[in-house]
Amino acid sequence: MWQSEINASSLVDRLDNLAARHGPAIAQSFIASGEPTDDPLELSFAAFVADVRRRSKALAALGIEPADVVAFAAPLGAKSYPTLVAALVAATLAPVNYFLETDALVRII
């Protein structure tokens, strides 16, 4: 473990450390079709962290506060991971299985 990662006191600090240390390296590789021969959509650590920051600021602009809980019920896609991490930065994340029946989702949320 790197010293800067040890000293990171928050998730945001850890993300900043990742972006600084591994900026151009690939953080996420996503193939929407699921076909291994298709070209992946790749996101560098720097771009991933920048996207997380944009999304967490957007959540805050919507009135989401650190004490709030954000439910996430969606299929995973290229933007799911930055969105999930942004919700972790902005509030508490509660991932929910989107295959559940509406009544079950309502009870959980």
Image (cartoon, helix red, strand yellow):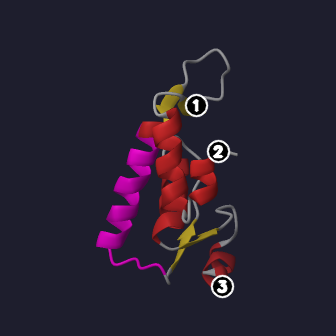
Residue 65 on the magenta span: yes
Quadrant the C terminus occupies: bottom right
Mark whose residue sits in front, 2 or 1: 2
Q: Point out the frontmost of discs 3 and 1.
A: 1
Give the image location of residue 68, x and y in percent: 49, 82
Please tell me which of labels 3 and 1 falls first in the chain: 1
Q: Is residue 92 above or below residue 5?
A: below
> Residue drawn 55% across and 44% down?
77
* Distance of label 2 from label 1 (alpha carbons): 24 Å
Q: Which residue is mark 1?
A: 29
x, y percentage for residue 78?
Answer: 52, 40
Q: Are marks 2 and 1 in contact (CB under 8 Å)?
A: no
**Which amino acid, by three-letter code, is at mark 1?**
Ser
Q: Are marks 3 and 2 in contact (CB under 8 Å)?
A: no
Quadrant in the rendering for residue 73:
bottom right
Q: Are marks 3 and 1 in contact (CB under 8 Å)?
A: no
Amino acid type, residue under disc 3 in the picture: Arg
- Residue in front for this viewpoint, 28 or 24: 24
> Tag 1 or tag 2, which sits nearer the N-term?
2
* Number of callouts: 3
- Where does the magenta region start and end? 47-66
Q: Report whether residue 21 is seen.
A: yes
Q: Main secondary structure of the magenta part?
A: helix
Label 2, on which residue?
2
Q: Please name whichever residue, 11 or 96, is drawn nearer the observer in this view of the structure.
A: 11
The answer to whether residue 21 is above or below residue 40 is below
Q: Is residue 34 above or below residue 55?
A: above
Residue for point 56% across, 65% down: 9
Please tell me the numbered disc located at residue 107.
Answer: 3
- SS class, disc 2: loop
Viewer-nearest residue: 60 or 96: 60
